[in-house]
Amino acid sequence: MPLTKTAGYEAATDRYAELGTDTTDALQRLAAVPISLHCWQGDDVGGFETSRESLGGGLAATGNYPGKARTPDELRADAQKALSLIPGTHRFSLHASYGEFRGRHVDRNAIGPEHFRGWIDWARSLGIALDFNPTFFSHPKASDNFTLTHPDRGIREFWIEHGIASRRVGAAMGRALGKACVTNVWIPDGMKDTPVDRIGPRTRLLSSLDTIFSEKIDPAIHLDAVEGKLFGIGCESFTAGSHEFYLGYAVTRQILVTLDTGHYHPTETVVDKISGILPFVPGILLHVSRGVRWDSDHVVVMSDDLEALALELVRGDHLARTHIGLDYFDASINRIAAWVVGARNVLKALLKAMLEPTDRLRALESAADYTGRLALQEELKTLPFGPVWDHYCDTRGVPRDREWLDEVRRYERDVLFARG
């Protein structure tokens, strides 16, 4: 039986049409945008290695909400539940420490595609793609917050081997699933107090990265990205992999640069960086997070910052060269709900941006009619966006905003609480 349009959606369609926006076109464009859900929200960055150090590397997951995934099968089930509540076809991002090692000790430099076969089969069954991340933390050889910059050549080479192995895993994922896997390199390397030598670690990092990326991989199946950070816990004074370092590296090596919305000064936004960077690199990986004071890893909410980010991506026609992933972890709330809230908010922000009559605003701006531009921008804030979002959820077969939490509560009662 065909889905009927509600009166609310019809009214919203008419209202947007008055300004020259086709809601059907906007929804079709939104359906083509995948969001990459991050595995580490589902188990507090635990992973499935036989032995794990404490998190380290500036990472800290707080809270003890019941029902945390303890096995790959449990994490896959939880992620699948979350994906069923998010409209559209999306992706899943894995860290190297989430392989299936079946009780055997497999060190980071020895991982291979065979340890992620279960994840590949699962993704194929859902018709989704995978992304990948080397795990340069929570390991004895990273206990001093030095990996690819380590002054000990042997330790540095261990982590170089891990980076090479991770790229091969990512390529295997892309090849098996027919969609390019984005493998993102982030390292925790830095110092708590002011260093004397800043150039030494960065020179070693440059050499390490060049070795890792020396093997050429078909971009149709695999893309490389590098992610900078302002600081981390234990690295407050110096971060070797800063934004400036990785920007220069990405431009000169023509790989993706990762912009994490929580990795900059509290008053700094990535919105203006996008158009400043894209003319010089093949694309960007966007990690959407929410900074609160010193911490960058809070669940994404529908904020002015998020809406501004979506507007920039849509207005600049940057979506084709932007890979969007979530990056946060909150163990104080239902972990599946955290995935759903963040992903749905990113999609809502993108939809609002796609409903904007950008050509009309651009014409006003070109005519130097800044008064008209401001007036129209303010008018858009009260347009009936909600019914359009509800219609999108209806057409994609997922619950509306006031309904999806009931499904999470049922899963929580029947599955999560039973884990003990």
Image (cartoon, rainbow, N blue to C red):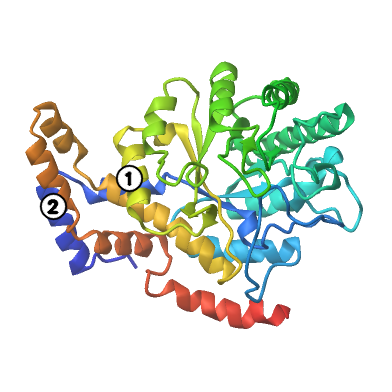
Task: Please tell me which residue is depicted at 40% across the width and 75% down the height of the picture.
Answer: 403
Q: Residue furthest top?
A: 252
Q: Which mark is residue 308?
A: 1
Secondary structure under tag 2 reads helix
Which residue position is annotated with label 2?
379
Q: Nearer the viewer, residue 194 or 176?
A: 194
Q: Earlier in the sequence, mark 1 or mark 2?
A: 1
> In the shown orientation, is residue 112 left or right of residue 302?
right
Is there any visible trace of residue 27 in the rendered image? no
Relative height, residue 262 to residue 9 (above, below): above
Task: Give the mark count.
Answer: 2
Q: Position of residue 118 (x, y in %)?
A: 75, 53
Name the residue type under label 2.
Answer: Glu
Q: Position of residue 44 (x, y in %)?
A: 67, 61
Q: Nearer the viewer, residue 52 or 383?
A: 52
Q: Position of residue 107 (x, y in %)?
A: 87, 44
